[in-house]
Amino acid sequence: MHVPGGEPFNAQFRAISPGFFPAFGIALREGRPFDQGDVRGGEAVAIINRELADHVYGGHALGKIIDVYQGPEGVEARIVGVVANTSQYGPLGPQPPIVYLPLAQTPDKLIQVVRSFEPMRFAIRVHGDPLAYRDVMREAVARVAPTQPIANMRTLASIVESTTADARLDLLLIGVFAVMALVLASAGLYAVMAVSVAAREREIGVRMALGSSASRLLAWVLRGGVIQIGIGLVIGVVLTLVAARSLRKLMFDTLGTDSAFDPWTLLAVAVLLLVAGVLACLLPALRAARVAPMHALRGE
């Protein structure tokens, strides 16, 4: 493929029907989708993905011309839309540049060239269990092409599951280690607060002897722990925002977003850590509030 007057470049090619993008949930970023008016005899049109639009057209692809497949089987089309990238090789795989043409406009010779190394695939979006429609799908294809065999009928969920198996295992291990880290951090915070209360037992006794109530002592001890937790949360949020940039390659952007930052998830985790930290501080604080003044001052 190439841009008129430009250097050739490699890109994947798809001949699709107008319902392709809604069926797969691929977001239209710019322009328009294909419609029933995109037929032979009309203006040849194409839709490209964001990867191709950014690297070949500098992000300004609408209205530009692209030559799809050089040679007598090729076609020159005007770009009418840009869609999101698709991670068809898994979350860590590349997002290749892709050109989409309306199936109704694609020359038969070009389709034959493509089918010589890649089979034709049908994607059907249904309500309910997709596997319950297998016989209906086979009958529909048989009415149009009785000699056409149908093989490897799978749900998209099963394809995604097999493709992301390694990534999901990695995330599971990360989750296990994260829970272990939370438990260890809570235990460490509890130990620090317990030692701090024991070391300040005389000060606690003096405060109580001077009239400080148990509730005020409880708040005083908790305040020190909450300050430490707050400092840790601020540092953690900053590091999370930095790490989110490196996680963008793990995110599918077919839904119209390429951000790995989810403020609600970040807020939920921060609240969880805050609650765990406060609970770790609570027992030492309760012990401090129950210290008898005479017992605390007896050693002096």
Image: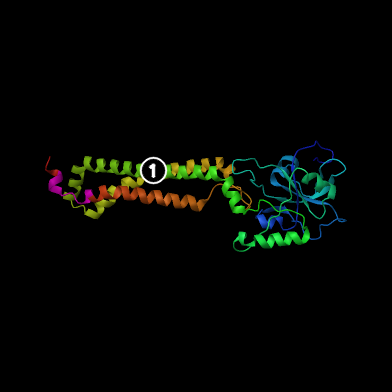
Q: Is residue 77 visible?
A: yes
Between 17 and 27, which is closer to the camera in this rendering?
A: 17
Tell me which amino acid carries mark 1.
Met
Between 246 and 39, which is closer to the camera in this rendering?
A: 39
Colour scheme of the picture: rainbow
Quarter that holds the N terminus: top right
Badge 1 density bin: few <14, some 14–19, many ≥20, Cα 10 Å: few
Q: Residue furthest top?
A: 7
Label 1 secondary element: helix
Q: Position of residue 198 (x, y in %)?
A: 22, 42
* Tally of marks: 1
Residue 265 vertical placement versus 245 (above, below): below
Q: Position of residue 192 (x, y in %)?
A: 29, 41
Is 222 on the left or on the right of 85, as rendered? left
Q: Is residue 292 magenta?
A: yes
Q: Is residue 231 visible?
A: no
| Residue annotated with mark 1 | 180
Q: Position of residue 18 (x, y in %)?
A: 74, 57
The secondary structure that dominates the magenta segment is: helix
Is 177 on the left or on the right of 58, as rendered? left
Q: Is residue 294 magenta?
A: yes
Q: What residue is rendered at 52% in x and 45% in y?
A: 168
Residues drawn in magenta: 287-296
Is 137 on the left or on the right of 128, as rendered? right
Between 110 and 282, which is closer to the camera in this rendering?
A: 110
Quarter that holds the C terminus: top left
Q: What residue is rendered at 81% in x and 52% in y?
A: 45
Between 230 and 260, which is closer to the camera in this rendering?
A: 260
Q: What residue is rendered at 24% in x and 51% in y?
A: 286
Is 188 on the left or on the right of 17, as rendered? left
Q: What residue is rendered at 42% in x and 42% in y?
A: 177
Q: Position of residue 23 (x, y in %)?
A: 67, 57
